[in-house]
Image (cartoon, rainbow, N blue to C red):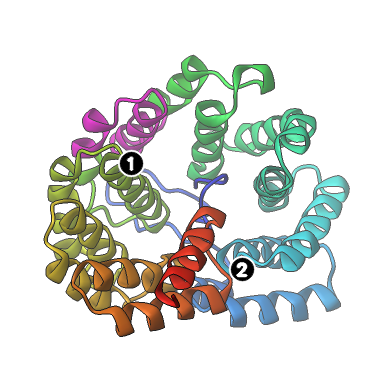
Amino acid sequence: MSFLYRCRAAALLALLPAAGHVPAQTLSDPALEALYVAERPAELQRAAQQRLAAQPDDAQAVLALALAAMDRNDAALRREALDRARGCADRQPKAQPCLYAHGVLLGVQAMSEGLMAAARSAGTVRETLAAAHALDPAWYPARSALVEFYAVAPGMMGGSLAKAGEFARGAPRSEQAAALQARVQMADKKTTEALPALQALLPVADPALRGDVLQWGTQAGLMLVNDGQAAKAQPWFERLMRAHPDESAGPYGLSRVKGELGDWAAALSLLEQAGKLRGAERWPIAYRQGLAQLKLGQTDAARASLQRFVDAGKGQKSSLEDAKKRLAELAK
């Protein structure tokens, strides 16, 4: 699970041996697991809060609330989930779901508050995730979160590509090791080497590992697009669309590729497709539609798209400012 970048967390319990294994569950509670797998975070939140009202140290409910908070990217809910996870971890130091939820949520919360907060919390994040991992080194989420921490955190905060690589290579299953090592390559600015390895893992069945592969591959692809290497990202997004046609990341990413290559009509069509698929809310689709429509000379449509993006108030600050600037220019 990628705790610094992801809105939607991936966690699982009781990872089984590779030979003849059943795909691991995110939550061991069937009712909570069903809501998580179906990507119904609002219902998952309600179910978790109801259970925590009856039993504050229900570790499965603590983890469920953490997952819902990150999936919904709600700051107030994240703080509530963090308080629950911290308390549970303090009272149950061997409750792996609570330790994991505490470390992940603290990392996300600290990053949202800026560099100083991240620096103050880095040691606690690392120690908490390490404690969760030590309880069962075969538990994939804790290993994934540790790799992410060591790969992303600056050296002064305890980051280390060597450490990240060590945890990646030590994964108990070859597909886990391959995905985690690709994540380390991304952190080492070897994106073009990481992407083919992630692409080969797209058919993986394990839901938590699949979540990492989809996220990291899409992140790598968009990094290439932003670096002016859109053509190198195109195979990933095309393969993603074939392997997971219900995911918005494929057509959204391919729309970015097409736009960079100058095919704005195709880019706009792909954005419309992405907007109807799972996870569409994670992408600035209205903003990108506005840019494509401007390129195609569709001024009125562009104005409506950009206004819709600004009114929603979600997205990167730079994108929101750019949208407002373009709207002001269109109003002249």
Query: Dot 2: what SS?
Result: helix
* Residue 143 placement (x, y as % from top left): 52, 36
**Amino acid on which disc 1 is placed:** Met
Q: Residue at 61%, 17% (x, y): give it.
A: 155
Frontmost residue, 52 versus 114: 114
Q: Residue 223 carries which label?
A: 1
**Amino acid on which disc 2 is placed:** Ala
Vertical relation: 130 (above or below) 68: above
Q: Residue at 43%, 69% (x, y): give it.
A: 329
Q: Name the residue under label 2.
A: 68
Instruction: Look at the image and tell me in which quarter the C terminus lies.
Output: bottom left
Judge from the rendering whether residue 302 lies leftward or rightward of residue 326; answer left or right: left
In the rendered structure, does residue 192 fall within the stretch colored magenta?
Answer: yes
Mark 1 or mark 2, whichever is nearer to me: 1
Indicate the quadrant where residue 194 lies: top left
Frontmost residue, 7 versus 232: 232
Could you classify mark 1 by the number of other residues whose Cα lies within 10 Å: few (under 14), some (14-19), or many (20 or more)? some
- How far is mark 1 from mark 2, CA to CA? 27 Å
Image: magenta residue range: 171-197
